[in-house]
C-alpha cells in the first residue's frame, strides 16, 4: 500500500488576494506530491511565505497580488529578513525562510505567473557552525541498559523497549524517526541477520548494519511486550499498543541523563552523532559513514571531522612531552 501523502496546510490570507492564495495551495500540493516534503517542512514553508506576505502588505499598504509579488525588489526582501532577524530568529531559520520563498518564486515562474528575480539576488544568511556534542562511549552504552532505570515506577517491558530503541540509535546511527518507523518484519531475529532496512528522509531506504546484542535487546523487548507485534506493524509500540511517540524516548533520555550526570545535549539525536563520531575516531571511512547515516551530501557528514580533530587535540595536549 502506498504511503499516505502529508496534508497540505490550510491557507487563509487577509494580506493577499485570492490568486496568491490559490497559487500557494497549488505550490504546497506540488511540494507534497512531487517533492514529498514532510508535513513539518510544508507547515514551515507555508508559515514563512505567509509571514512574508503579511509583512509586504503592511510595507506596501495594500493586499499583495501576484503581479506585485513578481515585481518584488531586493530591498523589500532585505527589509523582511531584517524584521525577522530583529525578532531574534536564528540564521538557520532565516535560511529556511529564504529557501521557502525561493521555492514559491520558482513555482510561479514555472507556472508562467511571473519571475521573482529579487529572491535570487539575496544572499543566504550566514549560519554559525555548531558541532554536535557526542556522548562518550561508556555513557552511550548505559542508555541501552534497562537496569539503569530499575528504580522508575514503570513496567519492565517499557524500560526494556526504551533501552532497545536507544541501542538502535547508537548501534546503527538511526534517526529516531527511522528507529520508530521500523516494522516488525524489518528486524531480523538474533543470529538470523545483521542488517536493517530503514526508511529515511525523502522516503529513501537504505541498509544499515545492526549488532547482534542490539537485536537481542529488541528480541527481549518483543518477548515481554503485552501487545501483539504483527509483521507489518511497528516494531516499537506505545503503552496502548499504537505507534510509539518520539517524545516518549526523549523524556526517557531526559530522566536518564539526569541520573548519569550528563548535559542537556545528551538527546536521542546525540546518540546518532556519537555513532558517527566513534566510528570516525576508530578509523572509519567518511564516505562509508555518509552511507550509513543516509546523508545526501558528504559535506553534512564532514562536520564530524571537526569533532574528531578536537579529540585528537585533547590527546595531543595531554600526552605531548613539553620539556
Image (tube, rainbow, N blue to C red):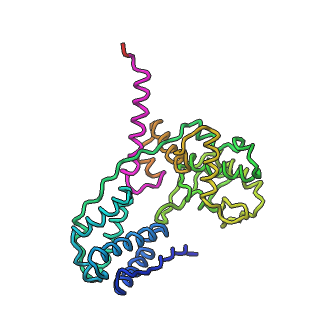
Residue 216 counted in the magenta span: no
106 left or right of 12 in image:
left
At a point 39% along the width and 51% down the height, the residue shown is 300
Q: Is residue 266 above or below residue 233?
A: above
Residue 4 image position (x, y, % from top left):
54, 75
250 left or right of 111 in image:
right
Q: Which residues are magenta?
A: 292-321
The quarter holding residue 41 reads bottom left
Q: Is residue 101 above or below residue 68?
A: above
Magenta stretch, main secondary structure, is helix
Q: Quadrant of the N terminus?
A: bottom right
Q: Nearer the viewer, residue 166 or 222?
A: 166
Residue 296 image position (x, y, % from top left):
40, 57
At a point 54% along the width and 53% down the height, the residue shown is 174
At a point 32% along the width and 63% down the height, the residue shown is 83
Q: Nearer the viewer, residue 124 or 63?
A: 63
Q: Nearer the viewer, residue 273 or 130?
A: 130
72 left or right of 191 in image:
left
Q: Quadrant of the C terminus?
A: top left
At a point 66% along the width and 59% down the height, the residue shown is 236
Residue 314 counted in the magenta span: yes
In this rendering, the count of numbered labels is 0
Residue 24 image position (x, y, % from top left):
38, 79
The quarter holding residue 18 reads bottom left
Amino acid at each position: 500500500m502506498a504511503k499516505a501523502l502529508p496534508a497540505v496546510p490550510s491557507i487563509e490570507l487577509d494580506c493577499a488576494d485570492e490568486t496568491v492564495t490559490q497559487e500557494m495551495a497549488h505550490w504546497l500540493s506540488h511540494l507534497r506530491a512531487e517533492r514529498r516534503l514532510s508535513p513539518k517542512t510544508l507547515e514551515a514553508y507555508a508559515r514563512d511565505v505567509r509571514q512574508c506576505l503579511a509583512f509586504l502588505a503592511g510595507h506596501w499598504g495594500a493586499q499583495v497580488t501576484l503581479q506585485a509579488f513578481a515585481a518584488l525588489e531586493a530591498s523589500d526582501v532585505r527589509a523582511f529578513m531584517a524584521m525577522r532577524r530583529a525578532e531574534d530568529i536564528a540564521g538557520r531559520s532565516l535560511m529556511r525562510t529564504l529557501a521557502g520563498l525561493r521555492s514559491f518564486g520558482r513555482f510561479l515562474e514555472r507556472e508562467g505567473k511571473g519571475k521573482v528575480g529579487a529572491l535570487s539576488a539575496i544572499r543566504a544568511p550566514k549560519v554559525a557552525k555548531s558541532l554536535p556534542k557526542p556522548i562518550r562511549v561508556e555513557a552511550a552504552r548505559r542508555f541501552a541498559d534497562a537496569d539503569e532505570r530499575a528504580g522508575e515506577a514503570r513496567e519492565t517491558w517499557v524500560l526494556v523497549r526504551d533501552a532497545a530503541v536507544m541501542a538502535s540509535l547508537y548501534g546503527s546511527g538511526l534517526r529516531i524517526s527511522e528507529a520508530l518507523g521500523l516494522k516488525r518484519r524489518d528486524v531480523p531475529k538474533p543470529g538470523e541477520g545483521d542488517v536493517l532496512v530503514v526508511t529515511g528522509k525523502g522516503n529513501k531506504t537504505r541498509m544499515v548494519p545492526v549488532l547482534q546484542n542490539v537485536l537481542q535487546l529488541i528480541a527481549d523487548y518483543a518477548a515481554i511486550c503485552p501487545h501483539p507485534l504483527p509483521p507489518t506493524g511497528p516494531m516499537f509500540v506505545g503503552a496502548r499498543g499504537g505507534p510509539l511517540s518520539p517524545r516518549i524516548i526523549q523524556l526517557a533520555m531526559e530522566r536518564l541523563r539526569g541520573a548519569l550526570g550528563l548535559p542537556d545535549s545528551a538527546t536521542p539525536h546525540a546518540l546518532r552523532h556519537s555513532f558517527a563520531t566513534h566510528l570516525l575516531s576508530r578509523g572509519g571511512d567518511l564516505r562509508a559513514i555518509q552511507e550509513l547515516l543516509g546523508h545526501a551530501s558528504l559535506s553534512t557528514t564532514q562536520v564530524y571531522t571537526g569533532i574528531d580533530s578536537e579529540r585528537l587535540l585533547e590527546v595531543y595536549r595531554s600526552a605531548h612531552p613539553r620539556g
